[in-house]
Image (cartoon, grey):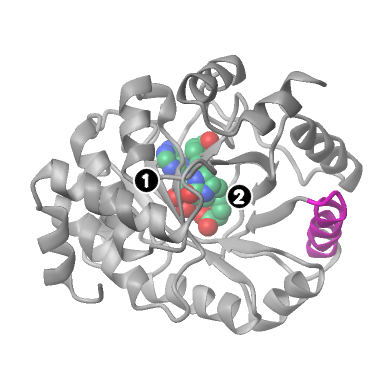
Amino acid sequence: MKTLDEFRAVYHLPLPELILTAAEAHRANRGYGDIQRCELLSIKTGGCPEDCKYCSQSAHYDTPVDRQPLLTVDEVRTRAEAAKHRGATRFCMGAAWRAPKDGPEFDRVVEMVRVVRGLGMEACVTLGMLTDHQARRLADAGLTAYNHNLDTSRRHYPEVITTRTYDDRLDTLRAVSRAGIAVCSGGILGMGETEDDRLMMLCELAQLDPPPESVPINCLMPQAGTPLAMAPAVDSLQIVRLVATARIAFPRSRVRLSAGRDRMSRELQVLCFLAGADSVFFGEKLLTAPNPRESEDEALFRAMGVSASACETTSKP
Ligand code: SAM
Ligand code: DTB
Ligand code: SF4
């Protein structure tokens, strides 16, 4: 699927037909029961110069998030080891930067990537805009993927962020690909956009060559003090439709049911997995916001009868 009309035609199929089509694409292209557990760690928190209207870490808004300087490599190692014991196979690290500055801090992040890879986990980082040189250094350290979300459609973007452009975002994604690092890029639902805006975002991602290795679908977690603090929740069947459309458009990619699961019922999450989602953030905190309790996720996975081996690993500390 490449054109917006194709995306619309798929998205607006009768819902059972859409889910079945996505499930067939999922079964044909990936291990159906393989739902990846990822853990997320904020390695540098708050004080970000960007004005993303959804974000608790932007210095433009008065939010309850405390600033925290870049963690040490040892702190990251400890957290990554614990994540591995809980069954995570991917460790994702986020920094509240517009772009990393070359120097000791970037060197430290490169070392963090080496450490996580050394533990045998996939490593993903999200650090803001990257130069070609920085992308190559991360690639040399063995980085598995770089997360950099388009967030929304090109036309809705300026309503959400004014301190950078959509093309800045695409430039970084191209630098990441040029360095041979897999791209993780998706967006956030529930920022006042239309359903068509969400399809435009998927359509932009579908133009990337190669297509993104993973597509995170986040639901806005309204953050106190931000301009989107009072945004209403997204309709649950619209989430299912978008997940299914992403699965059909990116049959070989991970479609990640990312932020916002704490407000989703078990049944809605199961529908999303049926529609092709195959990854979650595991652990009680995302970057600054809460995630479902580990015990709840364990129970959900057990009830679904998937990833039994990962559950066994996680029950032993
Ligand atoms: N500063 C870097 C950047 O924005 O590229 C990396 C960190 S940023 C927090 C990573 C992503 O988290 C954002 O692109 C956005 O898609 C997602 N995110 C941030 N706040 C969120 C929220 N309140 N609800 C849902 N997703 C959110
Ligand atoms: C992504 O798409 N979602 C994650 C990850 N990439 C970095 C971030 C979710 C952040 C949720 C809000 C918070 O914890 O502050
Ligand atoms: Fe900064 Fe990233 Fe938050 Fe935007 S989303 S304010 S760039 S940390």
Which one is in front, 69 or 314? Answer: 314
Indicate the position of residue 29 as horizontal and vertical percent values. 44, 61
Q: Amino acid at mark 2?
A: Ala
Say left or right for 254 vs 269.
right
Q: Is residue 43 above or below residue 315?
A: below
Which stretch is magenta? 106-120
Predominant secondary structure, magenta span:
helix
Q: Is residue 244 visible?
A: yes
Q: Residue at x 25, y 29 (%)?
A: 233
Residue drawn at point x = 81 percent, y = 56 percent: 117
Q: Which quadrant would residue 200 be assigned to in this image?
A: bottom left
Name which residue lies at 40% across and 52% down: 27
Say whether disc 1 or disc 2 marks the residue closer to the N-terminus. 1
For residue 68, side relative to residue 165 (left or right): right
Residue at left offset 31%, top offset 53%? 24
Q: Give the answer, above or below, for where 274 lies relative to 314.
A: below
Picture quadrant where residue 74 is located: top right
Of 205 and 288, the residue lying toward us:
205
To which residue does mark 1 refer?
A: 53
Left/right placement of residue 207 relative to residue 315 reads left
Residue 113: say if magenta: yes
Quarter of the figure with the C terminus: top right
Crowding at mark 2 (Cα within 10 Å: few <14, some 14-19, many 20+): many
Q: Secondary structure at mark 1?
A: loop
From mark 1 to mark 2, how far is it between C-alphas?
Answer: 14 Å
Front one among 74 and 48: 74
User: What residue does disc 2 label?
Assistant: 96
How far across and down, in percent of the image, does residue 91 sit? 69, 46
Q: Are marks 1 and 2 in contact (CB under 8 Å)?
A: no
| One can see residue 60 in this view | no
